Amino acid sequence: MDGVLCFKDKNYTRATIPNPVNITCPYHGRYVIYYNNRTHEPFPDGYSFYAHNDLCEVEVFGCSTAGFYGENCSKPCHKNCQEGHCHITEGTCLGCQAGYRGPMCNEECGQFTYGLECNQTCGRCSEGEQCNHMNGSCSNGCDVGVYGEKCDRECPDGTYGRNCKNKCSKHCIISERCDSVIGQCVGECQSGWKNIQCDKECDGGMFGNHCNKTCGKCLNNEQCHHINGSCLNGCDSGYQGINCTEVKNNRAVIAGISITTVVAIAVIVLFFVFRSFQSNPQNIETETQEETPDVTNNYQEIAYSTIDTNSVHSNEHETEPMLECKNVSIKRKSEEPENIGACFAKEHVVNENQFEKRAVTSSEAPDILVNQLHKNIAEMKKCKDEGFKLEYSVLSTGEMFPCDAGKREENRTKNRYKTILPYDHSRVILYGDNECLEYINASFIEDNNGELAYIATQGPKENTVNDFWRMVWQQNVTRIVMLTNLMEHGKIKCSQYWPDCLTTELFRDFTIQNVSEKHHASYISRNFVLSHEQLLVNACKCDFLLLSIQHVSI
């Protein structure tokens, strides 16, 4: 039977035990148990195995009505006494209700404690305030780095600050991972960003990792691109190159002027050809018109991409314009021409080698209205897709920025192709064991607003599948879109990095569970649950789409 020990005799002997014995028991109960302990040594002096005792009389005194004390049981116990019980003579509480302390239970819990007997510790309330003395709640909210009713829970990953309302920066080296108090990024910033929260672009003429690289001679001393150092509006006089770090010489300037002249002549010839189409559509193969075209009237009707004159290779021999397509029917209205650019002059359909070093910028490609998209595609497809071929031919090839990480000896086996490597300034960096930085062939892609929109990566190889899922975990990826097949034209394009439907597979520290799979006409959708074995949490649910891709050679 459970009970509270009121008195235990450790010193009385046969000669010293008083008669009668008065014992005050300051506890509330229904029974009084008296017993002789004969089970635990050492036994007191004079102990006898044959000893026994007889109780002549036991008297228990107390108030007949609970909640009162005093000589006549007329004084009420304090309201904060536990269960309303107190000492029958002194009135001290036999225990306090939650949130109170002291002999009379008239003091609230303090020193950042609360609860029964004030033995629980408060959370981190706002401005270091004392929590509610009874239930531990914070009436004015939480301090930075914690949340919850009692402000005793650390901010979830990706948030920080007061009541965890702030989000960690996407520009941390591990995206959206930071200190829960002040938002300091775990590790460092991505290239082009600074401050402890990685929330400010490089400025002051600096760019790159840690903002430790100096911009080139941008036009009007403007700030260069904070990540790659390129000059968005061109270079100051006397400088050239993407970053405006190359000094021009006079010979280069003269060559540029000559090239510009060649391009201007080519454009005028093209206008002549368009004008000829309009005047005599039945003889477009050979007939041309000698009259100079009205450029002003035709300007709104002819859409063409401007050409970077500094990168055009001039030809030594002029060629007679010759059209690729024959007997092209061109409709014509009474006032304005339609489909003026139905065909292209052959010398303007350049091969890939002629544009090997040409860079296409946003200013070179005219905007296309949504309601004009179908019409634009139809125009581009004419003459055996000559329009698409022309645009494709001016795409830049080769490396525009450094790819040193992907070329390192220890990383070469992680690349599926030798010539497709991520740029150093935009590549995804993995955190390995002991927070060591590791490599994966993947790059961050920005949207039109300069925000990180998605990650582009190669189809995982057998030796990079674990790295792929580690990237998914660290970057909080929730949707995967696969734009390749496992096998194409007899060649392996991607290793299967997911388990079959309703099965589970372990990839190093990560367990992938394929919980559902649906086959549609042109794609397959799967749903995965990603678990971290060491952290023992299921923190990532991924939607997976495998699109049916038809590869077209251009």
Image (cartoon, grey):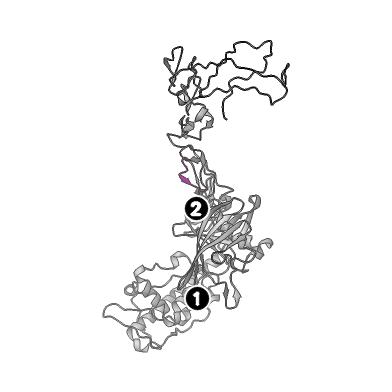
Locate residue 325: give its quadrant: bottom left
Comparing labels 1 and 2, the label whose residue is closer to the camera? 1
Disc 1 is placed on an element classified as: loop
Query: In the image, is residue 65 above or below residue 308?
Result: above
Amino acid type of the residue tagged 2 in the rendering: Gln
Q: Secondary structure at mark 2?
A: loop
How many numbered marks are there?
Answer: 2
Residue 381 position, x and y percent, is 42, 79
393 w.r.t. 501: above or below: below
Q: Magenta part of the protein: which range?
A: 162-170
Mark pair 1, 2: CA separation: 43 Å
Camera sees residue 402: no
Residue 323 inside the magenta-drawn segment: no
Residue 417 visible within the image: yes
Considering the image in quadrants, where does the N terminus appear?
top right
Q: Position of residue 478 (x, y in %)?
A: 50, 58
Q: Position of residue 221 (x, y in %)?
A: 49, 53
User: Which secondary structure type mostly characterizes the magenta part of the structure?
Assistant: loop
Q: Nearer the viewer, residue 491 or 82?
A: 82
Task: Identify the residue at horizontal 35%, vertical 81% (top origin).
Answer: 275
At label 1, the amino acid type is Gln
**Residue located beneath label 1 in the image:** 550
Q: Which residue is mark 2?
A: 223
